[in-house]
Image (cartoon, rainbow, N blue to C red):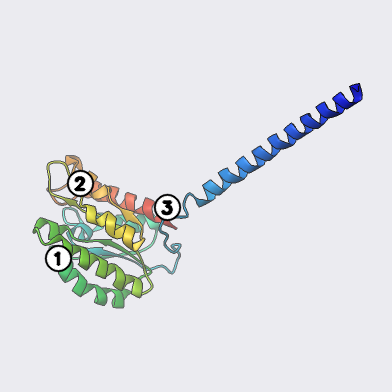
Amino acid sequence: MIYQIQLNTWMLSTHSSTTSKMHKIITTFLLAAILICSGCGKPKISTISETSVIVAFGDSLTHGTGANNNESYPAVLSGLLNREVINAGVPGEDTTDGLIRLPSVLEQHQPTLVILCHGGNDILQKQDAQTTIKNINAMIDIIQDCDADVILVGVPKPALILKTAKFYKNIAKQQKIPYQGKVVAEVLSTPSLKSDHAHPNEDGYQQVAEAILTLINNSQ
């Protein structure tokens, strides 16, 4: 009788220990799966290599208005990446003209990555938002048809408190591309980082470049 009780106690103890170990194994497995898949839903770009060709396409924010040529965000990003970043920014250009210009830029440079920051002039000129959305989507499609990755940078609407136009985030989500939607609004909200109401200064462009670098690194 005593032996039977001891045996039952041992079996219960063994079962409890085995169950506890199984719970720990399952918990560890689930945590590992969560960590592995935490970035699964994030849009990715090809790894930047020595053969990568990077083009920054946009308007005056890309051109670097408000700072010297070597202080534009493409120039600063080039130094951070230790790789040329071609500045294809045209001041005053809206997305309709940008859409027309884009194919020749792609043909000339044949990029593997395009950083697209466009639409600011559309917003300032109060153009129809649907036209801007259509044009930006068309630009992304054209770039991807050329087997290049795209990173989208959002631009804010003029306001007392600057916020990036919502359609940029929607476009990035729809197109499943990496998106930086905060840095331009933050820079233009900080007097010490801007040269005028619509353009960063040297320090502002530095922050834009650093934010885009972070996005590139996190998207590879």
* Residue at the image point whose x is 30% and y is 71% from the top: 141
Q: Amino acid at mark 1?
A: Glu
- The residues bearing labels 2 and 3 have C-alpha atoms spaced at a distance of 23 Å
x and y percent of residue 19 in the render?
70, 36
Q: Is residue 150 above or below residue 101?
A: above
Q: Is residue 70 above or below residue 182?
A: below
Tag 1 secondary structure:
loop
Q: Nearer the viewer, mark 2 or mark 1?
A: 2
Q: Is residue 8 above or below residue 191?
A: above
- The residues bearing labels 2 and 1 have C-alpha atoms spaced at a distance of 21 Å
Whether residue 75 sits left or right of residue 18 in the image: it is left
Q: Are marks 2 and 3 in contact (CB under 8 Å)?
A: no
Residue underneath mark 3: 218
* Residue at the image point whose x is 18% and y is 60% from the top: 119
x and y percent of residue 154 in the render?
25, 54
Tag 3 secondary structure:
helix
Task: Give the mark nearest the N terminus, 2 or 3.
Answer: 2
x and y percent of residue 187 in the render?
22, 45
